[in-house]
Amino acid sequence: MSEPSTFEAVREEIAYAYDNTVFFRKHMEASGLLPADIREPADFLRLPPTSKPHYRRNFPAGVLAKGYTLNSPHVMRFQSSGTSGERLNSAILSYDLARRQASALGVNRRFDELWRPGSRPRICRFAPPNCSDVECATGFSTMEDRILADGTLVLTVAHDLLATPEWQIVKALDEIELYEPDLLVVDPTHFAFLTRWARRLKRTITSPRRLHMVCGYTLMTRVARRQIEEFMGPDLPVGDMIGMSELGYLGFECHHGNRHVNDRDFHMEFIRDGLPVAYGETGELYVTTVDDGLVPRIRYATGDHFTPLEGRCPCGSDLPLVRIEGRATHMIRLTDGRTVTPGAVDALVGEAPGIDLYKLEQDRTGACTFRYIPNAAADRSQSSALEHRLTEALAPNPVRFEAVDYIAGERSGKFQPVVSQISAEGA
């Protein structure tokens, strides 16, 4: 919070939340604080963070600002997928969502033509069923039943991704063709799965319109990205979105392939052990909204970890650079006290041309199992090199490697490439 204007915006948000939301007033009073006590940036750290359980317990009456209800104009309701446990109900003003999206997407010049003045992109979504606002897991609903109020068509997919039957995949491919979208909003692991099936069925995924793709929902692994780009070709603009259902777009990937966070519509902190981390160090993202009239959030602990990076990006954007590390509940905990993040695992695995899908799972004893689905390009020397890299990175914890033809997804319907029972149970 080096900029005085940024700190003043944060102070205004604190005062607004205190005056207008029941929950946050009680939260500050429990800490013996008043908005007037936050006079300078160092005072901001005195405020205890807020978290999902606070908003889950107090939704809606305790967190909606005075004068608003869930039926107020421009209020959009959302439900999270339940990645970290129970699903979270939330609400956001449609114009705040649009503003945050525009700020984030602005870092990527390849998306400029998608948001021409007066245009309304046709969108198809292919993501875990829990991330949708319609029933799409069974596959028996009609195309019309799965078109949201904003015109987004939600494609069907089984709750257990790899158990999706062929007829349901054909239905998704047919509907993309019929709907003629401008934009595919996808979970990258899900869409990589769809491309494998399309290749097998000798199908294409195209549109008479200029297609773009936004990836989100789970970590975009290099393995998934490789498959998407090989199948869709180099002309498809692809951007990795940093976001949360309750907050919208928190950041985006620029046209140079770097991730930026949206510090125009949010104040962002990266915190470890209660203090901000230095550039190049990993911390949990705390978000404070700016000018959110509906559900202001102050020092909202997201559970997502990033490494802030120093310097300016050659893309020309002044939005800060970060490296995505992953959720706290997915971190691999080693017996020597070190932590290996999902982002670090992804970097070790790399594009892995011989692998279609992988999952690294840590059990309660600390032992790790790396399961992967090999493909026709699998090469023993590459597999041995990967086993060596992971064994070395995860030492002293033991690692077992298994080539399989099926890997189960999560209870939420998402497919997480790295999970840890130790981290999940300690959260």
Image: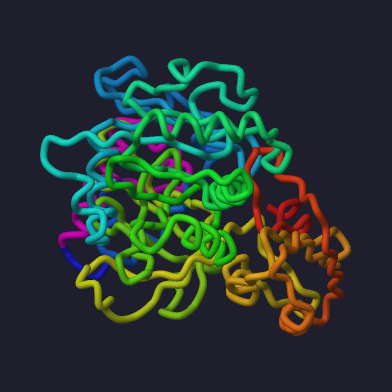
Q: Assess whether residue 6 is covered by the magenta stretch.
A: yes
Q: For the point 76% across and 46% down, which residue is it?
A: 408
Q: Position of residue 201 (x, y in %)?
A: 61, 43
Q: For the point 36% across and 27% down, which residue is it?
A: 64
Indicate the quadrant where residue 286 lies: bottom left
Check the image and report above or below for 392 versus 15.
Answer: below
Q: Position of residue 230 (x, y in %)?
A: 50, 62
Q: How many marks?
A: 0
Q: Is residue 274 in view?
A: no
160 lies left or right of 242: right
Residue segment shown in magenta? 5-34
Indicate the quadrant where residue 164 lies: top right
6 lies left or right of 287: left
Residues 108 and 374: in front is 374
Q: Position of residue 138 (x, y in %)?
A: 65, 23
Residues 1 and 353: in front is 353
Check the image and report above or below for 236 versus 145.
Answer: below
Q: For the point 79% across and 62% down, which residue is it?
A: 371
384 lies left or right of 267: right
Q: Quadrant of the N terminus?
A: bottom left
353 lies left or right of 174: right
